[in-house]
Amino acid sequence: MRPLDLAIVIAYLVLVVGAGFFFGRRQQTTRRYFLAGHAVPWWAIAASIVATETSTITFISVPGIAWAKGGDFRFLQVVFGYVIARVIISIFFMPWYFRGELVTVYALLQTRFGPSVKALAAALFVLMRTVADGVRLLLTAFVVAAVFKVVGVSGAIVGLGVVMIVFTLFGGIEAVVWIEVVQLGIYLGGAVAVLIVLGRDVGFGDALAAGAAAGKLRLFDFSLDLSRAYTFWSGLIGGTFLTLSTHGTDQYLVQRYLCTDRPRSAAKALLASALVVFAQFVMFLTIGVLLFAFYRAHYPTGAPVTASDQVFPHFIAHHLPVGLSGLVVAAILAAAMSSSLNAIAATVVSDLSRPRDDRQALRLSRVVTVLAGIAQIAVGIAMQHTARSGLDTVLGIASLVNGPILGVFFLGATKRASSRSALAGMSAGIAAVAWTAFATDTAWPWYAVVGSLVTFGVGMAVAAIPTSEVAAAAPRPFGE
């Protein structure tokens, strides 16, 4: 890597670690470590939400979707569901989070169903997030290994993981959120710069014409084929259910809302993020079309890469001018630093263990941060030879787990459901979504739909079965 590019990348990594130590001075209680004292402004939370859900996977995989053979703009249909779900969460879910002093969203399940349901949901979250973010590290490592040719993929995974652990360990959620604000500016700036470079090389008009001729500007697909990930119906329905689960019942994102002081501020942040998310997906898919035109012009005998997740890293490493290459690598590193380690630590400490006091809880949270980081590094190393798109992998994993959890929250909004029916529903939902994922060719956008609806349906059916147990006073539903 050229010296200027290397200096830019190193400067960014130093900034990240420095932010961890800067904010670390204030992390004396779990309220500050996990919730930033409820003092983060809504606009910073909006930027954090976008940076959290964007990640390296979006930066690398989405351009690859449009570049790949048969790829086009149909991925945007999923984003329609993202927007609808945000409106639903802002109206119905957001007030739930600010009743009492929540540390994690799973505490709602404790008050409604008891500790067993809460523990199951929390454990599923920890497992899912560890695997998903291990894949995130892996995709970033592809770029680092391509640019720093003396660093292998495994070495890059370890190096990035250590940086992530250090700044999260000391700075808590406060450092994570404010670094994500910086990240959003860096990676959007890097993406715009790539658009300009590609546009000058192949010409926007010519590239879009070539993309249109190859069918890459196609947006809508109204087919009812459940095996296809990017159709209007999978996007509208599956995207809505997926986002209801990831943004409504997943601690990784709900934790951001809890860093504000009131539900109105959190709702404003979530709705504002919808506009940015839609615009950035359009931009990343456009980059993919431009990459298609670029590689067709410069490599007439075939692109030097075959996997869609490798095309953008190859372009960054071999075709960006000095300085800009470093900026874009820094942007990708920025997207990778949206750490889930603090959310995992909050979940383990608050939902899966019982520390004696706040001081012990804070100590345990730091230990969990390190162990979770090591686990994510291990996942990244173990999955480095997979050929599947990173975006499909991560969203598929999220849908497998978050669907049943969403179904339990649906049950919590009813008067009839009990702990017994919630556990039965979750067990059925997990089994149903696992069967759907591994025994059928159903596409991942439908996993959350299957998991949540089966969980809710079975839970309500079990709740309707008479029992000989003496009925206790039922807790009130979430909405009351």
Image (tube, grey):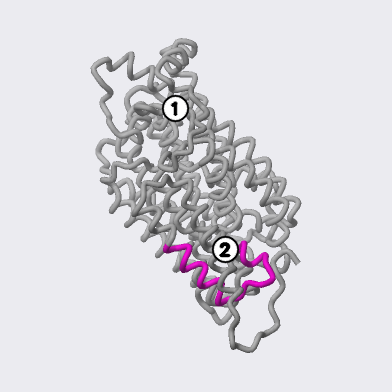
- In the image, residue 166 lies at what x, y percent? 45, 56
From the image, state whether disc 2 or disc 1 is nearer to you: 2
Which residue lies at the image location 34% right of the left edge and 43% below the top edge?
141
**Most common SS among magenta residues:** helix
- In the image, residue 31 lies at what x, y percent? 63, 66
Given contact means CB atoms under 8 Å apart, are the residues at marks 2 and 1 in contact?
no
Magenta span includes 425: yes
- The residue that label 2 is drawn on is 456
What kind of residue is marked 2? Answer: Phe
Left/right placement of residue 190 relative to residue 105 reads left
Q: CA distance from mark 2 to mark 1?
A: 35 Å
Left/right placement of residue 320 relative to residue 245 reads left
Tag 2: Cα neighbours inside 10 Å, few (<14), some, or many (≥20)?
Answer: many
Which residue lies at the image location 57% right of the left edge and 69% below the top edge?
461
- In the image, residue 23 lies at what x, y percent? 58, 55
Name which quarter of the figure residue 198 lies in. Answer: top left
Report the quarter where the C terminus lies: bottom right
